[in-house]
Image (cartoon, rainbow, N blue to C red):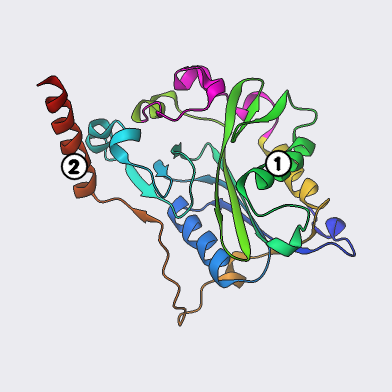
């Protein structure tokens, strides 16, 4: 779709990058670099990622969040990202949307997690206005009482990032790698993954969601589409990303520690 129709006088500029199938670790490296080394506003939409990955928040503990023996047995890659938030498993059925903003770009949005979440939910309310009973429940996007979007954030002195993994579709077997977190939202009510989650594809076409997000973005920003080639990292950059793959050794050590803990509880 044409982006020019969304350029508006007096609104802050937002650079839009549309991707398809970028590996999620590469996307996280790009996002962190733009957060920490750019002074512009960015929206990144990545339509699916080619490989199955588990992505944990910066403080996530594998032993508490993952069924590690299954993860090791099936050689599922585990990534620790630079931002907070919970744990997700992503693949080609996941659509990623990220906003990276200067604090002054949205002066009415206080640079704290809850105000940023409220702002994003109002933007997505425009996207889902004809799609279902959309709302923000605690830190999740839901239709009714079932989650389809998980969020994570990182806030620096002058900028913030808000990124979302949207479950357009998911493989039910993948959910078997994830434990139910001990700090689950209250509205979950101890439901298992399959009773707690829903698929966006049951509510609206995939292209409608992406086009609708771009259109809603134009209510808040003057949108300019950028090619990924135009923002390739220069060779002399000193930026070092912090999102990374966990090693097999790290996962094995977490599994061993968990086993020791289970034995000590039985003793």
Q: Residue furthest right?
A: 9
Kindly identify which residue carries mark 1: 118
Residue 197 x/y as whole percent: 54, 24
Range drawn in magenta: 178-205
Identify the residue at horizontal 17%, vertical 31% (top origin): 261
Give the labeled residue for mark 2.
Answer: 252
Residue 39 as seen in the image, left or right of residue 57: right
Residue 87 location (% of width, % of height): 43, 38
Most extreme residue toward the bottom, as rendered?
236
Q: Main secondary structure of the magenta part?
A: loop
Judge the density around disc 2: few (<14), some (14-19), many (≥20) Cα neighbours within 10 Å.
Answer: some
The reply to whether residue 87 is visible in this rendering is yes
User: Which mark sits nearer the N-terminus, 2 or 1?
Assistant: 1
Considering the image in quadrants, where does the C terminus appear?
top left
Question: Residue 134 lies in magenta, yes or no?
Answer: no
Neighbourhood count class around disc 1 (C-alpha, 10 Å): few under 14, some 14–19, many 20 upward: some
Secondary element at image label 2 = helix
Per the image, label 1 sits on a secondary structure element best described as: helix
Give the total of numbered labels. 2
Asked if residue 213 is positioned above or below residue 69 in the image, the reply reads below
Q: What residue is shown at x 47% (from left), y 28% (from top)? A: 184
Q: Position of residue 127 (x, y in %)?
A: 76, 38
Q: Quadrant of residue 144?
A: top right
Say whether residue 121 is left or right of residue 45.
right
Circle nearer the viewer, 2 or 1: 1
User: In the image, residue 230 lies at what x, y percent?
Assistant: 61, 72
């Amino acid at each position: 779709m044409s982006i020019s129709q969304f350029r508006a006088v007096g609104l802050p500029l937002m650079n839009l990058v549309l991707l398809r199938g970028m590996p999620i670790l590469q996307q996280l490296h790009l996002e962190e670099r733009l957060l920490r080394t750019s002074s512009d506003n960015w929206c990144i939409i990545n339509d699916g990622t080619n490989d199955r990955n588990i992505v944990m928040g910066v403080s996530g503990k594998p032993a508490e969040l993952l069924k590690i023996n299954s993860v090791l047995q099936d050689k599922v890659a585990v990534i620790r990202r630079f931002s907070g938030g919970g744990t997700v498993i992503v693949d080609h059925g996941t659509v990623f949307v990220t906003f990276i903003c200067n604090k002054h770009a949205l002066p009415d949005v206080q640079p704290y997690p809850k105000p940023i979440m409220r702002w994003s939910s109002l933007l997505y309310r425009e996207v889902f206005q004809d799609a279902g009973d959309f709302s923000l429940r605690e830190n999740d996007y839901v239709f009714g009482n079932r989650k389809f979007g998980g969020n994570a954030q990182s806030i620096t002195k002058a900028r913030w990032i808000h990124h979302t993994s949207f479950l357009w579709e998911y493989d039910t077997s993948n959910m078997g790698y994830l434990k139910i977190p001990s700090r689950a939202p209250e509205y979950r009510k101890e439901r298992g993954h399959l009773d707690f989650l829903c698929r966006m594809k049951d509510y609206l076409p995939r292209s409608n969601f992406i086009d609708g997000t771009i259109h809603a973005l134009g209510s808040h920003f003057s949108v300019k589409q950028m090619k990924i080639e135009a923002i390739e990292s220069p060779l002399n950059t000193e930026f070092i990303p912090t999102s990374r793959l966990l090693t097999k050794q790290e996962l094995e050590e977490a599994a061993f520690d968990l086993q020791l803990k289970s034995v000590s509880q039985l003793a």
